[in-house]
Amino acid sequence: MYFYAETPVHAGSGTALSGVVDLPIQRERHTEFPIIQGSSIKGVLKKYSKEAFNCQKNKIEAIFGKEDSVGGVSVTDAKILAFPVRSLHNVFKWITCPLILHRYNRDLQLLDESISNWEIPSLADEEAIVLSSIKDEDTIIIEDIEFKVSKKEISENILSKLSEALPYSPEDHISKKFKEDLIIVSDTIFKEFVTLNTEVVARIKIGDNGVVDSKAGGLWYEEFLPSDTLLYSLLLIPNIHKKENCWIECLTKFNLKPIQIGADETIGKGFVRTKLIFKENKTGE
Amino acid sequence: MLRSIEQKRAKFAWEKITQVKIKFEKGKSIQLKFNSEGKPIEINKTFIENYISYVKKSPTLIMTNGLGTTLAFYKSKSKDAYGYLYDNINEWFIKTRKIEAKDILEWIIDEKTSSIQVYQVTSEIISLLAWMKRFVESELGELVKNKNEEDKDDRGD
């Protein structure tokens, strides 16, 4: 299941004492890449199945579990696939890196054994692989860093597997933009961007007297994954259930629908559009 | 003996803030290291209030505006607590670099410095400031409050 952030997303990890941000987002500890915990995703899917899509109660319990029994579907942590960054050319671009592509390749193979091992180029920190029209340029500026455009290429096969993650039709503006503006940078550079360039918003609480209520923690900094971030998660359905149509029926309802994940729903945060791709013989993605 | 970087940051932060406390109690002033020709700064209540406020805001300022811009701003205000904060950051930077460097701002601008290196130093400075934020409130906060209470008592006479 793919998630395309249409508004900023805050999947929080509690209050942090150190550094800048009081309310940071969830991250994978050893890479510091942003993630959304599988438990968060599973909870959202269950809630929507119940309330929005009106799936039958016994089916919901079979798929998502109930109080005294485990649900059938396994939901992995949502991992980041592409991260939007400021760029002089075309407003913004998406970045990804070899580590992400490698993991994505591995995850797809989990679902579909026929998928080959991709040839993923390695990159120096100063290099960036770009697509299409700007290929003739020598350098490209992302945020405020100038990268050398690499001569290396990314295969059409990999690009199409990335493009199919978007919940929009191929003619849609974002789909076309993605094919032009996806950039591959090194793992280290990617980490730098996703740690220093998330949305950090100052929020205040105003008391009854119309002034910032500093006693109740009046000012805090909250971190968000920016709009246009692309993530994916695997939904794994055990073999015994794959013949039961109700699973597919229920989960398919999510395809191309907007759902809300994480905090601050009532201030418009966390709205993502999902896309569900099924792998026939195996499981759902 | 193995000491983590966190421990070292904490010790350095503690030393800098304790220095302010001691100077305040003795009614002295501090000579800024990066501005050794300039006038020493008087450590009074205003200095402490400002210093507390600046330290608290610094990580966000750095995240939002970048390390270079923020440091340039601090360095330009050498008469104020900003100058002392710049000194602190500069001193920590020099201490933790294995290559010899004289001044953090000059190092950032230098052609031989890559953006990855600036990113690493930025992370390190923000981690240091996290410690300074904690100590500044606990060690210096009460100095400012006490002064206020003393003033109130005087007025009562």
Image (cartoon, rainbow, N blue to C red):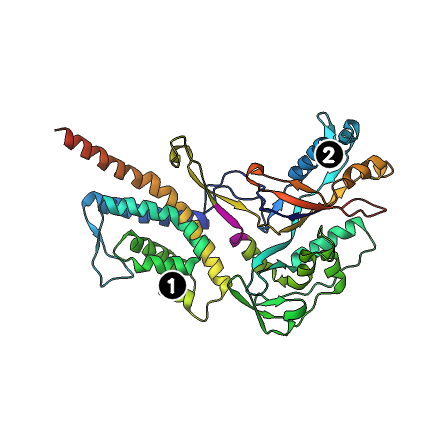
> At 62% from the left edge and 58% from the top edge, which residue is drawn?
A94
Secondary-structure class at tag 2: helix
Q: As rendered, which of A172 and B39 lies closer to the eye?
A: A172
Residue found 60% across the figure and 39% down from its top = A262
- The reply to whether residue B1 is in sight is no
**Lateral position of residue A16 relative to residue B46, left or right:** right
Q: Is residue A135 above or below residue A30?
A: below
Kindly identify which residue carries mark 2.
A49
Residue kind at label 2, given as amino acid type: Ser
| Left-right relation of A103 to A238 | left
Question: Is disc 1 in contact with disc 2, using a CB cutoff of under 8 Å?
Answer: no
Furthest residue to the left? B157
Find residue A149 and report its image quarter: bottom right
Q: Which residues are magenta?
A: A195-201
Q: Is residue A139 magenta?
A: no
Residue with the most extreme right position: A243
Q: Is residue A16 above or below residue A94?
A: above
| Neighbour tally class for label 1: few under 14, some 14-19, many 20 plus, Cα within 10 Å | some
Q: As drawn, is A29 to the left or to the right of A42? A: left
Q: Amino acid at mark 1?
A: Leu
Query: What percent of the width, then of the height, locates residue A163?
Result: 72, 57
Query: With respect to residue A122, does B142 lie above or below?
Result: above
Q: Secondary structure at mark 1?
A: helix
Q: For marks 1 and 2, give the CA distance.
A: 55 Å
Residue B61: horizontal and vertical position, in percent? 41, 52
In the image, which disc is placed on residue B105? 1
Subunit bearing disc 1:
B
Judge if badges 1 and 2 mark residues of a common chain. Answer: no
Residue A60 horizontal/vertical position (percent): 76, 31
> In the displayed structure, does residue B156 sit left or right of residue B1?
left
Count neighbours of disc 2 (C-alpha within 10 A) and say few if under 14, some if 14 to 19, many if 20 or more: many
Q: Is residue A134 above or below residue A73?
A: below
